Image (spheres, grey):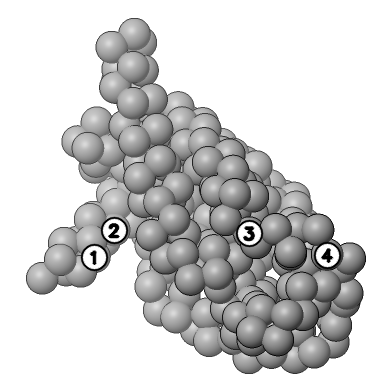
Amino acid sequence: YLTNTLGLEKYDVWASAASWLTILTVFTGLGMHTAMVRHLPADQAHNRFGEMSGMIRWSARRMLLVGLALGVAIFGARLLIARDQPELMYALAVVGLMVPVQAMNVHRQGVLQAFKRPIWCLMPDQIVRPIALIIGLFLFVQIWGAPNPRHVSWLWLISISAALVAGARLKSQLTPTEVRQAEPRYEGQKWFATAKPLLFLHIAGMLIAQADPAMLGSLGEPGQAGLFAVSNRIALLL
């Protein structure tokens, strides 16, 4: 729907910006969202609710701080990444706002996955966000006509913010009462030791999947990043 609404040339801009968002989001995770899947169930089995509360809070603060820092970094780096491409430069500026929001979405995924809630873990991102985006695009087209990449960037920010709100409510409801009420206990050194190799694995996988459209958007001819993104999505279905 987004490709048909924008057209290939305009979708090319958004495909490149979205790839940068995905790349930065991997770094904001710090591997902590996966480390929680390992530590939280083990702590729950031994009634270590203080450690569970501590890990959830400790990881959230660090992921948010890294997300804010990377958001500022991409805002400045857009001048180099998107030189002579004003539409991409604008989209990357909005991506800077998206990064900390998406960091918190990834954190919520880790928490709910650790609590063995896989459906609720993915619902905000796989259902709430796409529905919010489609509704936003439909209303925009009806009121103002065809959107451009700048408009799509803001609509995407609104949609992932809607996922953040829905996810935060789910996390609050599905986190065990004992964990919410426990006094936090912190074992940051142990948690980070677990997360560090996981972060490297996530980075390797991300570079394979997302580096090409990001580089094509900055260095390639107009339309190449969008065409690559569409082709890659089709290939995943086959």
Q: CA distance from mark 1 to mark 4?
A: 46 Å
Which of the two marks, 2 or 4, is nearer to us in this view? 4
Q: Residue at x 78, y 67 (%)?
A: 53
In this picture, is 186 found above or below 59?
below
Q: Residue at x 70, y 86 (%)?
A: 46
Q: Which residue is mark 1?
A: 232
Which of the two marks, 1 or 3, is nearer to us in this view? 3
Q: CA distance from mark 2 to mark 3?
A: 37 Å
Q: Closer to the camera, 111 or 22?
A: 111
Q: Secondary structure at mark 3?
A: loop
Give the amino acid at mark 4. Ala
Give the amino acid at mark 2. Ala
Q: Which residue is mark 3?
A: 175
Residue 224 image offset from top left, x and y in percent: 29, 56
N-terminal-most mark, 1 or 4: 4
In this picture, is 46 found above or below 180?
below
Q: Are marks 2 and 3 in contact (CB under 8 Å)?
A: no
Residue 182 circle label: 4
Q: Which residue is mark 2?
A: 229
Q: Are marks 2 and 1 in contact (CB under 8 Å)?
A: yes
Task: Using a 10 Å C-alpha cutoff, classify the residue at mark 4 as few (fewer than 14 neighbours), some (14 to 19) or many (20 or more).
Answer: some
N-terminal-most mark, 2 or 4: 4
Task: Using a 10 Å C-alpha cutoff, classify the residue at mark 1 as few (fewer than 14 neighbours), some (14 to 19) or many (20 or more).
Answer: few
Q: Are marks 4 and 3 in contact (CB under 8 Å)?
A: no
